[in-house]
Amino acid sequence: MTILRTAALLALVTMPASGAEIWVTNEKDDTISVIDVDTLEVIRTLPTGERPRGITFSHDFSRVYICASDSDTVQVMDPVSGEILHDLPSGEDPEQFVLHPDDRHLYIANEDDAITTVVDTETRRVVAQIDVGIEPEGMAVSPDGKVAITTSETTNMAHWIDTETQKLFANTLVDSRPRHAEFVKDGRELWVSSEIGGTITVFDTATQAEIAKIAFEVDGIHPDRVQPVGFEFTQGDSHAFVALGPSNHLAVVNAETYEVEDYILVGRRVWHMAFSPDKDLLFTTNGVSGDVTVVDVAKRTAIKSIKVGRFPWGAALRP
Amino acid sequence: MAPFDPRAARIALVAIVTREALRFVHQRERFLAALVRPLVWLVVFAAGFRAALGLSIIPPYQTYITYETYIVPGLCGMILLFNGMQSSLSLVYDRETGAMRLLLTSPLPRWWLLTCKILASTLISMLQALVFLAIAAAFGVRVGWTGYIAVLPALLVAGLMLGGLGLALSSLIKQLENFAGVMNFVIFPMFFLSSALYPLWKMAESSQILYVICATNPFTYAVELIRFALYGQFNLPALLVTLGAAAGFMGLALWGYDPARGMIRRKG
């Protein structure tokens, strides 16, 4: 037995097991890999519809919603049994979605139809369909639930949706191919990543004005391969961890100064990520290398890569 | 052969180690040169190759690593290898000046004297390897503190093996001038045909023959022993091969320095 393993075992004995899990969708395998946060091992693999990508839990974690892109549906799964309970109408090719703070309405980006679909998860009916730009992908809802954002990959815009009227009230240009959006700092700022542009644009939510643009540069990697996609914020929104796609690195961005502080090597083509419950570990999905890299958030180092299915894409925490 | 006197043995050990240490202290250039070589590899070579060589995950690593991280254990091995050869050079020098003959006339057993000699040069190599690891840490290649402790016995065993090789070679080299030949025919093949610069699976991808050579090179096992130790892990096969090779080289050196049989007799 190695010293490392002994240390890990000791840690396990002394620390109470949290039982938390990271759920990862595997695009090519049509499965979900469930990773135990304590042992950092895959403990379950669950079948899903075709090409699962976006994944999110209901607020009480009794249901998990999965975008089955090629099945043109959002699936609702019981996380305990792993059974698909039912499908939700989602419009064509749902890629990403976000659950409204009311825990009831899903805002879904329909990549092929240039539409954002709003679905009531209780009545299982489409509440609204909003025309947005071409190839919508990134989705976000403000913490107060009043504003929803869709980013369109080809139009290169963030579309601002009033959730009461389900109508667009603003469109803001960002760099090429925006893929992910998040509200931060209690909804005061909106961050949008642009994959081809290689930047993150930060907006002031009240005025929809651009307040910062963050660029990335990884040593020894061609700028074309530095493609920001998913990002997540640490405890207190002080730092953002940004997945930089085929550059195989994460960037650590100071959310106050908007400066990049560190780069961390992870697996190939990193897409999205999820934190452990106390946000001390970060799990990144690496599409091409088919694994999930675990990052020690405080030390900013990768500690382990865990093999999952083929082309892991989305990630979500089940505490 | 004289009976083994522990007290005298200890005096001899201290004396030989002190002599090596003094020689080392007086040759500061040698210390710097021994450090500059691996640092040039780490800073220049690794930077140039980091994009060219993608590494997959192999034990003892648990995730993706940069090329700099990969070659640090191999560069520790490089320090030990060059120092092992350097001490063989100084042994040839000692032979030419007669200091070696003086040493070997001591009533203590020859194997003990030669072991002291190797141990002395290994301790100095270890010191250099530790300084190198500290500089590598400053460049961002760090391991846990347990790794820095666990690597000490690994460096010792690897150093003894390479010191033994140097000693065996010194018994075969007749003149100081032949040292260049040792460089070409021992150091370079031993270093390049090992896992120091590229993992063995990468070698197997391009040539099966080269892979087999690398996998039989004892230096590969010395490097892997150091690599695993740096990550707090124990590699038993690497330890066994390194110890076996150390014993083999020592045996060869003893034979070489035996006045009744080896090269010393032929040289007169």
Image (tube, helix red, strand yellow):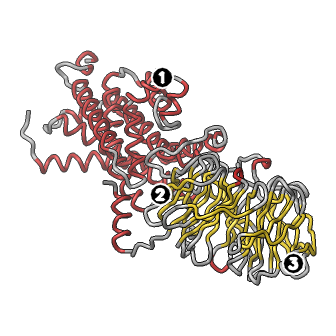
- Can residue B99 be seen from the camera position used here? no
Q: Is residue B110 above or below residue B173?
A: below
Specify the subunit that label 1 lies on: B
Q: Is residue B8 above or below residue A241?
A: above
Q: Are marks 3 and 2 on the same chain?
A: yes
Circle on res. B138: none
User: Residue type at mark 1?
Assistant: Gln
State which mark lies toward you, 3 or 1.
3
Left or right position of A56 against B72: right
In this view, the residue in front, A153 or A65, is A65
Relative image position of residue A144 (x, y in whole percent): 76, 84
Report the residue marked by disc 3: A162
Q: SS class of the residue under badge 1?
A: helix
Residue positioned 41% across, 57% down in the render: B148
User: Residue type at mark 3?
Assistant: Asp
Report the residue marked by disc 1: B208
Report the residue marked by disc 2: A44
